[in-house]
Amino acid sequence: MQYTLLILILPLLSFVILGLVDSKWKAQVAGTLGTAILVTVTLLSYYTAWEYFSTANITGSYQRIIAFETEWVRFTDYLHINLGILLDPISVMMLVVISTVSLMVHIYSLGYMHGEKGFERYYAFLSLFTFSMLGLVVATNIFQMYIFWELVGASSYLLIGFYYTKPEAVAASKKAFIVTRFADLGFLIGILVLSYYTKTFDFGILTSGNASVFASTTGVTYMGISVMSWAMGLIFVGGAGKSAMFPLHIWLPDAMEGPTPVSALIHAATMVVAGVYLVARLFPVYYVYSPEVLHGVAYLGAITSLFAAIIACVQTDIKRVLAFSTISQIGFMMVGLGVSGMGGHHGLGYMASMFHLTTHAMFKALLFLGAGSIIHAVHSNEMSLMGGLRKHMPITHISFLIACLAIAGIPPFSGFFSKDEILAATFEFSPYLGAAMSFIAGLTAFYMFRLYYGIFWGVEHKHAHTPHESPLAMALPLIFLATVTVFAGFIPFGEFVTNDGAPYEIELNMLVAGISVGVALVFILLATILYRKESKIPTQLATTFAGLHAAASHRFYIDEVYLFITKKIVFNLVSTPIAWFDRHVIDATMDGFASITQRISVLIKGLQSGDVQNYAYIILMGALVIAGLVIYF
Amino acid sequence: MFDVFSNFSSGIIPMEAYLLLSLVMFFAGIYGFISRKSLLMILISIELILNAADINFVVFNRYLYAGHMEGFFFALFTIAVSACETAVAIAIVINIYRNLHNVNVDSLHELHEPESEQ
């Protein structure tokens, strides 16, 4: 299956071509080329998935296939960095998800970004991102993953800061880069610790279940915690940074400064789930060698999920609401992984998490693209400037409603199936956590329908010109993703993706399903009462719980805490003294050398008078002195 | 050294006499090069130095390696080279004169760093 290499090469090629021609071609040519290449990549991904799932299951479980591998850097006999393509159920699943969403975003952007300055640059960056993300998911070893991990970080930085003349966008891109970079430091240290003890980077060896690989880690502890927990914990820090887990989530809401299709692709569907994918990829290692870290992942996911859901309930910028909703849903996926066991029914959480990743990618991309369509029509992100749009934008309205129902967990939409399985797995792990997650699922339904009613119902706002439905290029992806969202739930996902490779029959847990649907319906009803028509109750509630409301609107002051730590503590107590030392000791030493040299040169420059006769005299006298010395000594 | 004069009676000019001449010419050239201010005089001094060297070539060849020709030819080469050098130098001197209206070596300080710049 060597042709899978093309899946990586084509977007890279597209990036190079579009990056080089810049604005020399007409914008439409560049956009069409980028989209055409993505169509090819998507078809190749689908073909790969079809071939993989139809041929790889020979012995009752899906085999991992190394489609291509080459050695890149060799450090020692054991330790070498390879570049290759690994096909196994989750990487093939990710190939399909990424290429589908990316293609939809490419098509959508033809309409959304029409006439923007830097259109070619935008498509070049999209191609770079697609290449990096695909490279990340097919990585055969943890170091290759790290390389592409940084590449997606860089392309995310470039795309958030696409409107580089806007100060907020520049600040947001910087924030995203620094926060994730900071987390990636943990990832790198984790990789180094892990590879130091196991003598390998390779996923195949790490997850093979061969205990001798980890033999050297037994009994090694640092500060009372086993070295495997340290390594896996630090690797998870990297994943938490990319996947916006509390308290490293602060970059994601600000990342909404980028163009909306970018938010759909990177900050909703693909890049932000890289952390989930990382944990899933190393799941056997987490499960066997550091179960306490895995449980930590579950609880951190639950906390993040609750935290983000509460904030999402009071935000007024539609993209911010969706951003916090993304954080919350990634929390769900983390919980799913954290509570999962190994194989068969115990591996339900893992399977559910991957399932939710897929369905979430589709419906969240749909929500973002819908939001982009709305922003395109009313030229604002603020919910207060919308309202009553359902008459003007029927396609956007229907697709947005489908996505809202899916994320709220209403059957038969896709979100119901995946979320329900996460809840079932969580209930088996701990009923308290399960109850908490059900409540968060309810909150999800509440804030999504608050958003929905705020945009499409309520009082119609006066607009400069009547909002209109978006062009075909934008409507088509909405229709496609809405269709996927309606039917994706019926994919027998357990047949394809499980953590031991063996197909598993999903059974719907009717009790859990009943509870979650009930909770979701209650919260939707609540949102309907509060926001369907203009009512005084939301304002009254806001004044009653003024403290909570203000705290949630300010995102619980996490950004302020960061600012306090960086500005007041790091800058004042660390950076300022270091800067002083740099200026007054290191710089001063160098200045000292320079000024000493200059003084000496002033002293001896009389010798270089330019007077030829003087030179000749000195040469002659010197020659005589040397001759005298040679003769008499 | 005073044998130089005693040998005149034999009718052969002794080698030392030539060397004495070239020595005088050489140091006269050096003195002129250092003390004269006119570029033309400096050029003439250089010619003196080169001619002193030419005499040495010829004399050493004649007295020490009679029958060989290397020294003579070397003297001829040197004369040719010094002629070329003089032509170039004269060209330079003429250009300097056109610019400065004198050929005083002390007035050539165009490339010198001005004193004010520290």
Image (cartoon, rainbow, N blue to C red):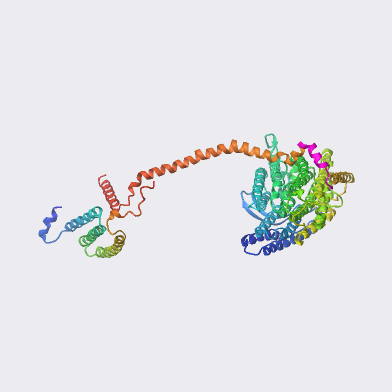
What secondary structure is the magenta-colored segment mainly? helix
Q: Quadrant of residue A23?
A: bottom right
The x and y percentages for residue A607 are: 33, 47
Q: Single out the residue that lies furthest toward the top.
A: A224
The x and y percentages for residue A536 are: 82, 42
Query: Is A545 inside the magenta-drawn segment?
Result: yes
A62 on left or right of B10:
right
- Is residue A217 among the parts visible in the rendering? no
A403 on left or right of B47:
right
Query: Is A301 inside the magenta-drawn segment?
Result: no
The x and y percentages for residue A404 are: 82, 50
* Residue nearer the viewer, A317 or A460: A460
The x and y percentages for residue A348 are: 82, 46
Q: Check the picture and name the quadrant holding the N terminus of chain A.
A: bottom right
Q: Check the picture and name the quadrant holding the C terminus of chain A.
A: top left
A183 on left or right of A602:
right
* Residue nearer the viewer, A169 or A78: A169
* Residue nearer the viewer, A127 or A509: A127
Q: Single out the residue that lies furthest toward the left.
A: B9
- Give the extent of the magenta segment: A532-547
Counting labels gives 0
B113 on left or right of B37:
right
